Image (cartoon, coloured by chain):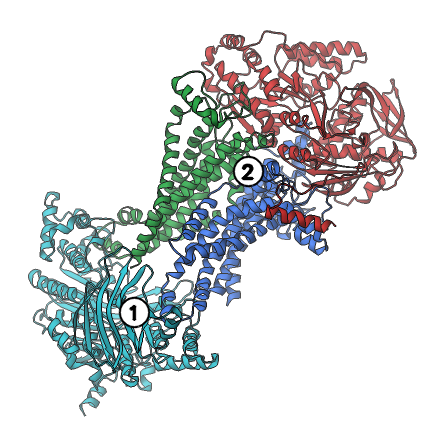
Amino acid sequence: MTDVAVEKDQDSLGVLAWIGIGIVSVAIFLAVFSPWLIPYDPTQATENVSTPPPPLSAWPSLFWQTIVGDGPTPHWFGTDASGLDVFSRTIEATRTDLIIALSANIVSVIIGVSLGVISGYFRNIWTETLLRTSDLLQSFPVFITAMILVALAGRSWVNIVLAMSFLYAPIYLRLTRTEVLALRDRSFIEAARALGKTEFGIARQHILPNAIGPSLIQFSVTIGFAILLTAGLSFVGAGVRPPTPEWGSMIATGATQLVLGDWWPSLFPGIAISVTVFGFAVCGHILEKRYGR
Amino acid sequence: MADSTNTVLSARGLSVQYANESPTLSDINMDIAAGEIVGLTGSSGSGKSTLAYALLGLTRRGAQITNGEIYFGRNDLLALSDVELEDIRGRDIALIVQNPRSALHPMYQVGRQISRVYQTHRGSGGAEAHQRAIEMLRLVGINDPERRADAFVHELSGGMAQRVLIALALSTSPKLLIADEPTSGLDVTVQAQFLDTMWETSRKTGTAMVLVTQEPGILANYCDRVIELDAGRVSKDVSASEFVSTSMLHTTQATSSGQGEGQNRAPLLKVEGLRKTFPLRGTKKVVQAVDDMSLSLFAGESVGLVGESGSGKSTVGRCLLKLLDSDAGKITFDGQDLGVVSGEALRRVRQRIQIVQQDPYDSFDPRWTIEKSLLDPLEIHQIVPPTEARAAIEEGLKRVSVDASVLGRRPKDLSAGILQRVAIARALLMKPDFLVLDEPTSMLAPQDRHIILDVLKRLRTELGLSYLLISHDLTSVASACDRVVVMYLGQVVEQGPTTEIFEKPVHPYTKALIGAHLEENPKTRRVDRTDRVDLEGEIPSPIDLPVGCYLATRCPQATEACDKERQVLSSFSSHHDVRCMRAGQLELDKAS
Amino acid sequence: MRLTKGYDRWVIFFAFALAACGPSQPNDTDSSSVIYITNDVPAGLDYDGAASVIPNSQEGIVNLMDPLIDYAPGETTEEGVGLLNFTSFEGRLAESWSFDEATLTWTFNLRRGVKSCVGNELTADDVIYTFARAKSVSGPSPTGWFLANVASIESFDATVLADENLRGLGDEVKKIDDYTVEIRQSTHNQLFLPALTTFAIRIFDSVEARKHATPSDPWSHDYINNVTAPAFGPYCVERWEKGNEFVLRANPQYYRGVPEIDRVVFKKVPQSSNRFIILRMEQADITKGLTPREFKKLREYDQLQVVGVTGNETLFVHMNFDSPPFDQVKVRQAVAAALPYNWIIKNGYIGQAQIWDGLVPSSYPGGKSTFHDSPEGLDVARQLLAEAGYPEGRGLEVYEDALRLSYPIEKEAILGPIATAIRTALRDIGMPVELDPIPLTQYGDRQLVKKDLPFALVDHEKAIVVDAGYAVQLFFVSSEAGAVNNMVNYRNSRVDDLWTEARAERDSERRYNLVSEIYDYLRDDVVWLPVVEYRTQWATRKGLKGFVWYPDNGIRFADLSYAR
Amino acid sequence: MIWRFTLRRLAVGLVQLSVLIVAVFFLIRLLPADPVSRFVGLNASPEAYALAEQSLGLDLPALEQFEVFLFGDDEEVGLVGGELGTSWVTGSSVNQEIRQYLPVTLELITLSFLIAVGLGVPIGVLGAVNPGGAADKGTLIYGLFAGSQPEFSWGIIFIFVFFVVLGIAPGPLGRLSPLTDPPDFVTGAITIDALLAGRVDIFLEALWYLSLPILTLSFVLSGPIIKMVRENVAQTMNADFMFYGQAAGLPRGILARDALRAAFAPALTLIGILFGFMIGGAVLIESIFSISGLGQYAIRSILAFDYPAIQGVVLTISALTLLIYLAIDVCQALLDPRVSV
């Protein structure tokens, strides 16, 4: 009976689900193909400093011009104070942010899930310590800790990924462990044991595949937050190095131009990040509704 | 139909539908007379619960009563306003549901939940309502109701919560009580007590009752009339005795111990002084699961291990396979001391001892196909060459009468009965000598139970297997076992040949257990019996066990000495042991 | 009255009903009070304290404390900014002074009747206290001692740091009578008077300062750092909330006349864009440290003005001699040739800068102005790079770590675009440069202490002592010869020798020639690559006048007045 | 009972905090930059460096530094005496600085939570009572959207729209106009201090100046709150006990109260966790609106490698977070009898 109710809930989510999937697909597409899509080198300073985007009315003719190859490609989103093309940077930043967020989550999932399986399945003093340590990590102020870690290790995307993994792995560890604890007492684990399977075999073949579900749902939600954190870190100057295109740092540098009336360098990356994270949040929600809990 | 003046409630043309689905119930007509107990039965998914709720004018979220009338007195319930309905529900028609613990609000004391329903419908003051709640709790057999009224639902056992729910339902003296599988998940003795209470109340107050159940024993023992649903339609509406005579294929018969009469041979399995405790987290206390358990089982023999939940019978099964390490005692299997084997040797022994678990859905990896689940153990033990594995599992399935087409399916796509047979097939692929059957039928519908028992009996003859059948269902044990071992709170209280235990039980606990057994026969109704031994109160906590006899607090025949002296299992007659110092005395009393 | 006004705004904001009207902002300042918005308020007022290296702290100090002497006023620019005459001094707390060549002794006659904020009168004891305190090197950043050392005051040398027993004041600074003090130098050193004009070794009110001494803190560092610096300057601290607000009130007994601006509210607004809007909305009177674009924009508003001078703020490129490939002069020359100077002036500073053609600010006497005489351009740069052995940049990949152009992250708004343009230009000639903005602390540590920063943009290094030689001593002689800030690890024994000679030279012209010769070496070796001198600017509401530029770039509010 | 529970949890928290102290202390000392350079400033000679190092206590081996940090030395009492040390940048006591900055942040986020919860709960309930309806979909989409937004981006947009373009909101000038004298420092929360000083005008002015940051934060915070309230209430409405309550003929009013009571406990947990997160997470909003709160202090300290201040901030935030978690647990235990005490 309750199944029917859930079924119904999904139907009402139809349009929203497609919006979410659409956003995420576009983001991934842009991230993969950005080098072939952008008209300008996103890190090359030019003489055209702080040029506004062309008025909307001029877009059709400029678009035509671009297609027939007549004259230079316009700066669709204008240029920033360094003369960098905002359009190219906004697109290219999808790649930067997505790579960081994805890598951080993949690393966290690998670490968190394997430690979660270990600490849930084999319970001893070491796994208990591991668990307490990960609890402690979660009481750290996320943003400030990430800033310290990045300051500690230097600004590079690898370090940002590691810092974020440090913060996100405990989430996955917890999720997995809870799941493993419930699985441990399931009859099929006992059955497998009675049928002669080794403990390691059980952990690998039965526990792990069955325990990973919630982590995969969390994955979609956390990617969105990882993008926000990446951008936030860049915003306070602890993110990727300029002039690497990154939404947060684009917003930060663009924000200083806002008061001069230059709204374009910060607005476009702002929209990009809002929409992308929303897309991941929607996908996370859908996954949770469909497969979660 | 029934006389209209005597009719409490009648439904006409009732249909219920979930949005965009085919109707769950269509065109139901039924009448319930005052003081009548109507059994409502049908296979799962037949719509019996939906009908039970619909009789109150209620549906679960997402469903709707699309058609029909429900006359209660002069009113059509479906034509009343919500406020008027609120008045009738709970006051005139009360409901008991199958999961009492989630039906009670987790954050209010249960007494308050009773009193506020009473207050709502009887408009009494708070103090009076509280008195009423305590009175009702006492009425349904709860000890110390003043204290229990302040308890929260999570502090109550399932049986107690069920009683709270009935107290709540009856507190307003309704004209009709609808009980939706009220005893599922209860132990047999508790179930019997509970149903007795309901039955007596109905007889005393003239309350009509609708009892939704799948248990033929309940239908036979307590119902006047039975309505059977099939796919949302009434398929039968007959008296209980007619229903039983037309629908019940099997009747209980104790099998005589034909095989396994080889007491002079060495036993296949020997358990001596087994003890198992579980530490209680955060304290130094332990939960005693099994204590001083001894058991012998001969090749080809089938032994039943019975007892209620918490008696430690499943723990025994797990210790035999070394799925749990015992604290003390010795287990010998075919001359080999299981206490010392480990690693590869253990795996070889385990191959010979297999287990069939209670919940078939839980005993398969939900992500694996049946084929994978069956092939995996074959590969581990390399029982057959890989090329013949497929043939071997098909052969195994055939043995339990399951079609090979299930191989590509996943557990959730199969019915419980089929899946349990697959589980048996999986165990048998190991070519074991001995099977531990841990409540193999308790999750199944009655029809499936019979099939499983038939398969087990057949396989035993065909393959010469030995069984340890762990069950609280005496019907299964009676039909499949040569010998029965009765456990209570981790101890064996009585053991002996099946017929003797069933026909001449000695220990008061065994007597109560057998007495609580509901035979599927309206002619031997429990409520008509006079020689019942009923236990009082509740099972003591396995953490703080009594010093003397564990049953002393509940035993009607207990003396002061029972409270103080530890009981030992001693021979009562040949092959019949009893753990009761008063056993001989009781038999004498009975005889005189 | 205020209540209703505030309430109005509140309601309006949430109702949006009267959106168009907008509440009036508080802009009715009276002319005797100014609000100065700054990136930070003073973090401490002790020039020997940890906060003294921060310009904001120095700005607090110079408004509270007066020096013995200061530079005499010089010309006034077209914009009305007063300049100083760096060749001429005039008395402040000291009314007059004299120098005895033979004994290298300076005699200062103190002004009488000078009153501190709490009303104590200036005496020779205050001067003695000040120097004794400096020599105690008890603060974490003993700047007083350091400048005394630079000025070659006797026994204020580095031995003080090493040996605790040498930290007491001897007779090198001597009280003659209540209004006369003698200071003795160890050698002849022309930096003596300039050093006295800096923010450090300004004179404390010793009576008041001693009141706040404790056994563990005999020199009242805690009090001075956290409450006020008791002294004889034009202003007194009225309120101070670190990290937020710093309020000065005019010293009613100030010996040079009570300042016209009676009250100065320093308000911390860290982001330059925020300072921009606040000033634009006329909610404040003065700000500085805006980006060039913001300054330019502010000039468009009638009710505001922007004034400034090309003072001593410069941008140069630092290339470390110990970090290959920058150990090769051709590589350094290639960088020099490739830099997009015009882009930097036009787009980086929006025209508010000029090519820096030397290593001494053009406003200082004694600079050399031929640094950009050799041919420049990308082709020249490619040629030089090829000559260095890296045609098209091939072979430079191994120096990935050295080719990271660092700059302080706090300067991102200004230096970010410039660094990006430099990166673009250098990549154009084949140098695989990446950018590496790092926190100022880390930057300072690597640049000044570890001296391992390979490649950096520097725009905050200024010689506060106005002298071409001071820069040589500070930055260019080898560490062995006593340079403390030789951040690029330049070692040239000829330069060391020339400076040894110049340092003790009494004749100004000969000294000038020696220093000029040093600068020729610096130019040919591309020790620092000077890029531009940019304007030091203040944006204010119209009518505020009287700005005077000092080498520490701190505003002296006593100079200002409102013309209404 | 509840006291023993609280004490036990407090003890666990203290152990966690001790580990935290050790971790933070040594972690910071791995920072690649040397804070000493800041102090030698112009004079980076080895002697001056050694002197500065000595005055900061950095010449001692790390373990001894830790000992000083814990038990103090001649000048300070150390952590066991409740002192977090002296900031290297300002020379002031870190306790005092945190005492100054923390209330600022707490005030900001408390006000934002008041708004977010005040609006979020009714909206969430509205969405839940009519599943599948327009209100339900609307709240879901709003919840998902607001919950996934970068607050710094919106803060900037709000400043641009409301202040720069429309001119109807105050500029990002912190909590008060620079011209206004703040009320005497009592609690550090300016709204409370203003009321304590009897200055209603300053109270209103502070609310006025804080309106944009509060708007931004409550917008972002309302997302998860609305989403969670909606889901909890919907879940509760589907619960068996609600169905049974209906079957028992309980009046609607009582049922609604039952539902809210059951939905409240998990809501409390989420709000608590969000609040704990925001203490350290308000950094960006503070920096955009020039509010000198704990976050700004943290950034400044990290950029300046001010060890005592970093330690102080991290410990304060973590301790507060742990305290909040503790408070949640205690409240849960009080509210929900199922939580084992």
Above or below, D154 relative to B88? above
Q: Which chain is cyan?
A: B
Q: Chain of mark 1?
A: B
Camera-side residue of C221 and B397: B397
User: In this structure image, what is the colour of chain A?
Assistant: green
User: In this structure image, what is the colour of chain C?
Assistant: red
Return the residue at label 1: B310
Classed neighbour count for the residue bearing mark 2: other residues with Cα under 10 Å, few (<14), some (14–19), many (≥20): many
Can residue B117 be seen?
A: yes
User: In this structure image, what is the colour of chain D?
Assistant: blue
Give the left or right position of residue D138, taking residue B485 as reference.
right
Camera-side residue of B260 and C313: C313
Q: Position of residue B187 (x, y in %)?
A: 27, 72
Q: Quadrant of residue C363?
A: top right
Q: Chain of mark 2?
A: D
In the drawing, what numbered circle is on residue D157?
2
Residues at marks 2 and 1 on the same chain: no
Q: Residue at x 81, y 11 (%)?
A: C507
**Quarter of the image with the N terminus of chain A in it:** bottom left
Q: Are marks 2 and 1 in contact (CB under 8 Å)?
A: no
In the drawing, what numbered circle is on residue B44?
none
Q: Amino acid at mark 2?
A: Ile
Above or below, C520 relative to A108? above
Classed neighbour count for the residue bearing mark 1: other residues with Cα under 10 Å, few (<14), some (14–19), many (≥20): some
